[in-house]
């Protein structure tokens, strides 16, 4: 039987409880799930890539799936090229709303056309639907407590950033 290998990518800046929920749920459908922290030139990250990898790996230790999940990073290649190199059998994407669907439909088309790799879409749980990293960064920038929406270790790192600014 062919091993089922998934790839869930994002900037995860910062990692949210919504991201962790998708990772946990998606990992149940794969023998191996890669979570790729990839560079997006259209975004200005709050945390460097290595710090985001570290935070994700720490957050995964609290999930019962960390033996199936491997965090990777990449800064200069198309996701589909990495997927082919890893032997990925399906891409994993999350959908919170209709805007996500429109964006992801386009990515689905190109991923499938370029590689033949299918995409599995996971709907955000209703209570996690509003979460996105951009909103978390914005709230944090205005001094709001975001600890309810991010893992504890991410909240701790955000507080460290605040202390460095003082």
Image (cartoon, rainbow, N blue to C red):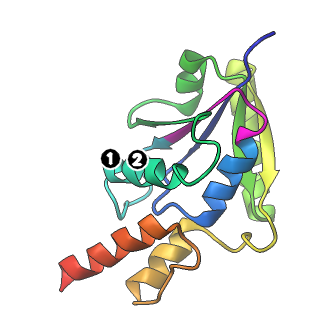
The Cα–Cα distance between marks 2 and 1, rounded to whole angstroms, is 5 Å
Pick the residue in front: 106 or 132. 132
Pick the residue in front: 18 or 63. 63
In percent of the image, x 69 and y 49: which residue is there? Answer: 24
- Quarter of the figure with residue 125: bottom right
Pick the residue in front: 108 or 139. 139
Image position of 13 (left or right of 121) = left
* Figure label count: 2
Pick the residue in front: 157 or 76. 157
**Disc 2 on helix, strand or loop?**
helix
Provide the residue span drawn in magenta: 27-36
Task: Say above or below: 57 vs 81.
Answer: below
Does the magenta segment cover residue 13? no
Task: Say above or below: 95 vs 153.
Answer: above
Where residue 71 appears, x then y in whole percent?
49, 38
Q: Quadrant of the C terminus?
A: bottom left
Image position of 19 (left or right of 92) = left
Where residue 58 appears, x then y in whole percent?
44, 52
Does the magenta segment cover residue 32? yes
According to the picture, the residue beneath numbered tag 1 turns out to be 50
In percent of the image, x 55 and y 54: which residue is there? Answer: 62
Near mark 1 (Cα within 10 A), the count class, few <14, some 14-19 or many ≥20, is few
Pointer 2 and pointer 1: residues touching (CB < 8 Å)? yes
Task: Determine which of the numbered discs, if any, sits on residue 53 in the image.
Answer: 2
Near mark 2 (Cα within 10 A), the count class, few <14, some 14-19 or many ≥20, is many
In percent of the image, x 65 and y 63: which residue is there? Answer: 18
């Amino acid at each position: 039987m062919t091993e089922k290998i998934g790839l869930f990518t994002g900037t995860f800046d910062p990692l949210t409880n919504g991201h962790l929920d998708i990772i946990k749920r998606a990992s149940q459908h794969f023998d191996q799930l890669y979570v790729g922290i990839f560079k997006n030139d259209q975004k200005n990250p709050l945390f460097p890539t290595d710090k985001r990898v570290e935070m994700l790996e720490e957050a995964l230790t609290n999930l019962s799936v960390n033996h199936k999940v491997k965090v990777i990073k990449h800064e200069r290649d198309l996701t589909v090229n990495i997927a082919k190199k890893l032997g990925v059998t399906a891409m994993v994407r999350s959908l919170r709303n209709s805007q996500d669907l429109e964006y992801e439909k386009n990515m689905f088309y190109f991923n499938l056309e370029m590689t033949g790799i299918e995409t599995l879409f996971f709907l955000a749980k209703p209570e996690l639907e509003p979460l996105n990293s951009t909103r978390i960064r914005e709230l944090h920038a205005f001094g709001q407590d975001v600890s309810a929406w991010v893992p504890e270790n991410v909240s701790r790192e955000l507080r460290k950033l605040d202390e460095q600014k003082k």
